[in-house]
Amino acid sequence: MIKIRKYIVRYLCRLNITPYLYYTYKWNNPFIIKKKLFSDAKELLIFDVGAFDGRSIELYKKSFPKSKIFSFEPTPNMYHYLKNEYSGRKDIKIFNYALSSNKGEATFNINNSLLTNSLLDSSKNEYTNSESSYNTKEKIIVETETIDNIFKNEKISKINILKIDAQGADVMVLRGAEETLKNKKIDLIYVEVEFLQLYENQPLFHELSLYLHSHGYYLYSLYNISVSKKGQMIYGDAVFLNPDIKI
């Protein structure tokens, strides 16, 4: 076993990859920590904020077949697709809300790429100007809701995994979970984070991290970091854990 390990180390060094980086690549998968925490859970509730075409639903169902998923998607055609795709499923509930910091209505931007749709206007900078996917085609009015209200209305006792992909509005989503966070009713938060403003007035990673830290949640790790051609970090994903969870 030791000889094999030494051979692997030498081989990696010839490729200019240090053993440390090898283990970084190997373990840089956010589902590892999720499975470690919840693989034996008898009941598991997942909030899927920004469900898009259901790919996240499928990933979570593959990893946690017995889980219950609440999915939120404000883009009308994607919402109707999800409602049709998961019709009759008692373990998957689809909501046509843009989760935010308050209940009401808001303007929602439909962009060239539906993956970039957002409550926020796209920024004008070197990166977004070179990416036509951020160009807005249409503005619509959507209904907004908060996690705190959903938590209360659905009589939820705990959210085990809160996944957020809200295209720059992630802190708005978290501010709508103020009471839920304060009462430590979320175990794990898996959220998209930005290091460069892709949307106007968008809070960046350090602001999101400070907000969660103010409620006791701590950063576990960063994943899937996207870097510009100039080497600047643009966006990625982060896992934050409930302070009562120790790994």
Image (cartoon, helix red, strand yellow):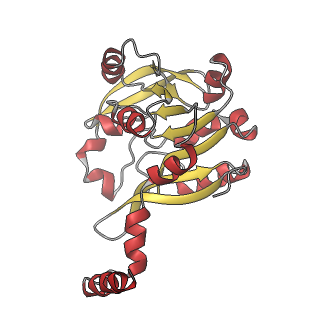
Between 196 and 8, the residue placed more toward the observer is 8
Residue 147 lies, with reference to residue 226, above or below; the image says above
Residue 163, x across and y down, in percent: 50, 40
Q: Residue at x 30, y 88 (%)?
A: 10
Between 87 and 61, the residue placed more toward the observer is 61
Between 176 and 191, the residue placed more toward the observer is 191
Residue 199, x across and y down, in percent: 43, 45
Q: Residue at x 68, y 51 (%)?
A: 245
Residue 107, x across and y down, in percent: 45, 26
Left of 72 or right of it: where is 8?
left
Residue 127, x across and y down, in percent: 32, 56
Left of 6 or right of it: where is 65?
right
| Quarter placement of the N terminus | bottom left
Q: Is residue 64 visible?
A: yes
The residue sitting at the right extreme is 183
Residue 39 lies, with reference to residue 209, above or below; the image says above
Write down the quadrant of residue 14 in the picture. bottom left
Write down the quadrant of residue 209 in the picture. bottom right
Q: Is residue 202 visible?
A: no
Q: How many marks?
A: 0
Q: Residue at x 38, y 31 (%)?
A: 109
Write down the quadrant of residue 12 in the picture. bottom left
| Quarter placement of the C terminus | bottom right
The residue sitting at the front extreme is 1
